[in-house]
Amino acid sequence: MPKDQIQPKPSYHGKRYKVVHCEGALDSFYDALKKVKANKAKSLTTQMALQIKRLADGGEMSNENFPSEGQLPSCPGQQRRKKFRALKRIPIRGYCWLSDRVPGTWFISHYVYKDYNDLDERDTDKVGRNWRRIEENGDDR
């Protein structure tokens, strides 16, 4: 398969982790991609797919391309709240977290087109809803 045709997949089983897209996450990736110039969309798609594969394989992830973004909801009795991260390929970010309920699994909540630096509260809320559905309610979609 030519390198420029690599597409993000619903899930990745890497050397160290499994990376799973939540329901609707891939749709949000392609929606965000519509805002990118056509000549950049192919390479950005390939770069994101390779970054997800690197995460699944346990490869090094730089803080520039995999920053800590915001706080996850708290669990009863939890002292410190965990943070979620972003798979960052400017101008698209995919928000994700490492699951406590499903060992060795990263869940990607959704993607956004982002041409600004601040974290939008709507994205934090969406990650939180997906986190609660999976981590608290056991719904792995």
Image: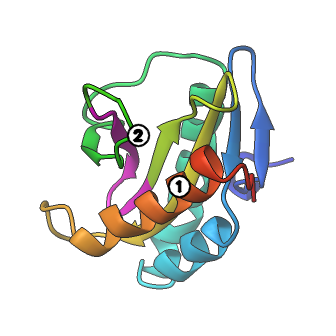
User: Would you say residue 79 sits in the magenta stretch?
Assistant: no
The percent position of residue 24, horizontal first and vertical second, equals 66, 73
Where 63 sits versus 74, above or below? above
Q: Number of labelled discs?
A: 2
Which coloring applies here?
A: rainbow
Q: Nearer the viewer, residue 123 or 31?
A: 123
The percent position of residue 43, horizontal first and vertical second, equals 54, 57
Relative side of 41 to 138, left or right: left
Residue lying at 26% horizontally and 25% vertically, measured from the top left: 79
Q: Residue 75 carries which label?
A: 2
Residue farthest toward the front in the current orientation of the protein: 77
Q: Which of 1 and 81 is in front in this view?
A: 81
Name which of mark 1 and mark 2 comes first in the sequence: 2
Whether pointer 1 and pointer 2 mark residues with C-beta atoms closer than 8 Å, the reply is no
Where 121 sits versus 94, above or below? below
Relative side of 117 to 63, left or right: left
The percent position of residue 78, horizontal first and vertical second, equals 34, 29
Q: Mark 1 points at which residue?
A: 132
- Mark 1 vs mark 2, foreground winner is 2
User: Looking at the rendering, in which quadrant would you find the C terminus?
Assistant: bottom right
The percent position of residue 135, horizontal first and vertical second, equals 59, 44
Relative side of 36 to 15, left or right: left
Region of the chain picked out in magenta, as a range: 81-94
Mark 1 surroundings within 10 Å by alpha-carbon count, few (fewer than 14), some (14 through 19), many (20 or more): some
Secondary structure that dominates the magenta span = strand
